[in-house]
Image (cartoon, rainbow, N blue to C red):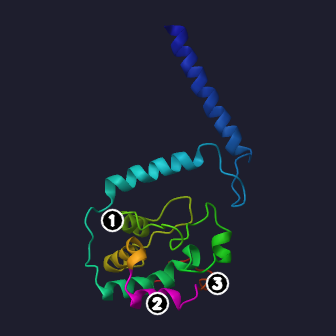
C-alpha cells in the first residue's frame, strides 16, 4: 500500500513539474492564431456550462415587447456587433483576430435555442479567456435583458428591431476602449 501511495504522489509531482515547465518556459500557445491546448475547449466549455446552469436566471426579467426588442437591437449594434456581427454581415477585423472566434449570433441557429436567462448571464458576466466582456458594470439589468431577449428571439424579431440590426454597420470602439468598456 505504501508503494501505491508513493507512486501516486510521485506521479502528481511529475505532472505538476511538467505543467510548470510547459507554461513557465513559454511552450503553451498564447497567441490568438495558435491552436488550442489539449482539452482546452472541452474543459472551458464544461466549466462554463456548469456555472451557467447553476447561476443563470430561469425566468426572463422583462416582457418581450416591441419596445424592448428595439432597445435591445440598438444596444446589440452598439456593444456586440463589433465581435458578433450583424445579420447578413461578415465578421469584422476585430472578430477575425480573436481566439476563440466569437460566434456570429445571426448566422445559423446562433443562440436562439438558448434560454434568455443563459444569454443574460453571459452578457452580464462575460466569459473568461474568450474576449467576451461582462457588461453588468456598464449596462443596467434591463438593458442586459433587452439584449438577451433579442438574441433568444433573433429568428422572430419584429420588423422594427430587424431594421435596427440590418441598417447599421458595426463600429470599432474608440482607440483605447474595448467593446462594452464605455459607460452609459
User: Label for residue 117?
Assistant: 1
Residue identified by numbered label 2: 164
* Depicted 150 relative to depicted 161: above or below: above
Other-residue count near label 3 (Cα within 10 Å), few / some / many at <14 / 14–19 / ≥20: few
Q: Mark 3 vs mark 1: which is more N-terminal? A: 1
Residue 93: give x, y in percent of width and height. Answer: 68, 76
Q: Which of 107 and 71 is in front in this view?
A: 107
Asked which quadrant contains residue 107, the reply is bottom right
* Depicted 154 relative to depicted 98: above or below: below
Q: Mark 2 vs mark 1: which is more N-terminal? A: 1
- Quarter of the picture holding the C terminus: bottom left
Residue 128: give x, y in percent of width and height. Answer: 51, 59
Question: Which residue shows up at 52% across the image and 45% down it?
Answer: 43
**Label 2: element kind:** helix
Q: Give the range drawn in magenta.
A: 157-170
Other-residue count near label 2 (Cα within 10 Å), few / some / many at <14 / 14–19 / ≥20: some
Asked which quadrant contains residue 142, the reply is bottom left
- Asked if residue 147 can be seen in this view, the reply is no
**Tag in front: 2 or 1:** 2
Residue 37: give x, y in percent of width and height. Answer: 65, 47
CA separation in Å, label 2 and label 3: 25 Å
Residue identified by numbered label 3: 175
Is 158 inside the magenta-drawn segment?
yes
Q: Nearer the viewer, residue 165 or 181?
A: 165
**Tag in front: 2 or 3:** 2
Amino acid at each position: 500500500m505504501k508503494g501505491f501511495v508513493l507512486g501516486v504522489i510521485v506521479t502528481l509531482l511529475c505532472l505538476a513539474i511538467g505543467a510548470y515547465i510547459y507554461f513557465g518556459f513559454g511552450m503553451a500557445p498564447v497567441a490568438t492564431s495558435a491552436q488550442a491546448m489539449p482539452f482546452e475547449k472541452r474543459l472551458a466549455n464544461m466549466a462554463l456550462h456548469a456555472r451557467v446552469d447553476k447561476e443563470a436566471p430561469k425566468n426572463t426579467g422583462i416582457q418581450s415587447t416591441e419596445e424592448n426588442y428595439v432597445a435591445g437591437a440598438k444596444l446589440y449594434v452598439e456593444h456586440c456587433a463589433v465581435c458578433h456581427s450583424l445579420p447578413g454581415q461578415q465578421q469584422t477585423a476585430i472578430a477575425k483576430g480573436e481566439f476563440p472566434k466569437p460566434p456570429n449570433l445571426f448566422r445559423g441557429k446562433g443562440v436562439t435555442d438558448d434560454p434568455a436567462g443563459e444569454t443574460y448571464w453571459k452578457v452580464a458576466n462575460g466569459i473568461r479567456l474568450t474576449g467576451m466582456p461582462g457588461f453588468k458594470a456598464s449596462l443596467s439589468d434591463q438593458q442586459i435583458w433587452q439584449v438577451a431577449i433579442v438574441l433568444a428571439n433573433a429568428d422572430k424579431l419584429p420588423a422594427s428591431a430587424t431594421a435596427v440590426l440590418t441598417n447599421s454597420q458595426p463600429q470599432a470602439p474608440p482607440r483605447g476602449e474595448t467593446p462594452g468598456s464605455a459607460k452609459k
